[in-house]
């Protein structure tokens, strides 16, 4: 009995060894090679893939109606310019991360709600669809922009200062830019027929208030404001408007004027003679202009320094393969 058990154990051990030897010595079945990811650039070790480039480049050309370049050299030059923008964006995002900057959900939602105010929902969805962009991708793009804006504000805007002396010097040297031309303030009433316009003009001449008739009868979007067109100079309104309002005296009600929009009646409320705007009137405008010019120069120098410190590798041969 013991002998039988011993033989059984030896047989089992031998079988196990043979099985192990089979798996050890069995030739390996080659696995299919992993598809190689094509890279067009690396920024500090982070790749920009050809797939990502293609997606963003296609959306860019659709959004801005960029015509296809017929010459290969021109097409490659356009792609290289776009790739440089992607590299700069990635570099700035990495810099924001190094400085611990982030965009909160609250900041992103506030930005998106402001942008959506310019679009009815369907219009926004259609605009995104036309450029092949999903809503979540659009949100991600906005988040990146907010993050870069925050970085620029911290690194660039915070060190720029425009002094009162600089503002004064710019004003003194560029007074011709602040010469205000003849301007008028006027109201209008717009209706569909000449007959209605003449009837309303008769009521105005008899003393009825222009603002009230404009609110009740005018077809123009400014009707709710009593037809107020605001203050404007020659050339800022359609030619038919200029021919009337700059000829009439203050308080005058114009004749009926026909335009592509309908039949108009104008009231000239004020006339402002040409004059030099004061420094106080244009102070903020000058300060903004100096600031923006300085910001652009500072940003270029700062971005160039980031590029020099970064490890950027471009694979132009992979870029040329992209259609």
Image: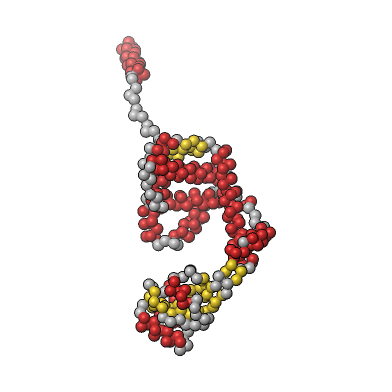
Q: Can you say whether 16 is above or below 77 in the image?
A: above
Residue 65 located left or right of residue 230: left
Residue drawn at (54%, 73%) of the image: 183
Residue 236 lies, in percent from the top left, at 48, 69
Residue 117 lies, in percent from the top left, at 45, 62
Report the front residue among 216 and 234. 234
* Residue 9 visible, this angle: no
Report the front residue among 110 and 244. 244
Q: Can you say whether 155 is above or below 195 in the image?
A: above
- Of the 4 image quadrants, the one containing the C terminus is top left
Farthest right residue? 165
Residue 56 lies, in percent from the top left, at 42, 46
Residue drawn at (32%, 12%) of the image: 7
Q: Can you say whether 40 is above or below 157 in the image?
A: above
Q: Can you say whether 3 is above or below 24 in the image?
A: above
Farthest bottom residue? 206
Residue 68 lies, in percent from the top left, at 37, 47
Report the front residue among 23 and 56. 56
Name the quadrant containing residue 200.
bottom left
* Residue 241 visible, this angle: yes
Residue drawn at (41%, 40%) of the image: 73
Residue drawn at (34%, 27%) of the image: 31
Residue 150 located left or right of residue 69: right
- Of the 4 image quadrants, the one containing the N terminus is top left
């Amino acid at each position: 009995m013991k002998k039988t058990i011993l033989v059984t154990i030896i047989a089992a051990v031998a079988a196990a060894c043979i099985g192990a030897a089979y798996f050890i010595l069995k030739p390996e079945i080659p696995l299919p090679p992993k598809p190689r990811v094509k890279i067009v650039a690396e920024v500090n070790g982070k790749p920009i893939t050809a797939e990502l480039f293609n997606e963003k480049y296609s959306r860019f050309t659709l959004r801005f109606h960029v015509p296809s370049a017929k010459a290969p050299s021109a097409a490659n030059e356009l792609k290289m310019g776009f790739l440089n923008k992607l590299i700069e964006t990635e570099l700035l995002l990495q810099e924001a991360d190094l400085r611990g900057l982030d965009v909160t959900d609250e900041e992103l939602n506030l930005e998106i709600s402001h942008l959506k105010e310019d679009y009815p929902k369907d219009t926004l969805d259609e605009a995104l669809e036309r450029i092949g962009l999903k809503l979540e991708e659009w949100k991600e793009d906005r988040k990146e922009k907010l993050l870069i804006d925050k970085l620029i504000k911290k690194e660039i805007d915070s060190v720029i200062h425009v002094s009162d002396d600089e503002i004064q010097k710019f004003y003194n040297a560029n007074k011709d830019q602040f010469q205000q031309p003849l301007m008028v303030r006027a109201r209008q009433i717009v209706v569909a027929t000449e007959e209605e316009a003449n009837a309303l003009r008769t009521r105005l001449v008899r003393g009825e208030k222009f603002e009230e008739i404009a609110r009740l009868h005018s077809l123009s979007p400014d009707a709710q404001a009593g037809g107020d067109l605001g203050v404007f100079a020659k050339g800022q309104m359609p030619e038919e408007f200029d021919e009337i309002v700059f000829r009439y005296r203050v308080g005058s009600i114009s004749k009926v004027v026909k335009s592509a929009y309908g039949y108009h009646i104008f009231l000239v409320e004020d006339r402002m003679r040409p004059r030099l705007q004061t420094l106080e009137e244009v102070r903020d405008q000058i300060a903004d202009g100096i600031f923006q010019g300085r910001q652009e120069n500072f940003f270029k120098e700062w971005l160039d320094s980031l590029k020099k410190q970064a490890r950027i590798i471009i694979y132009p041969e992979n870029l040329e393969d992209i259609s």
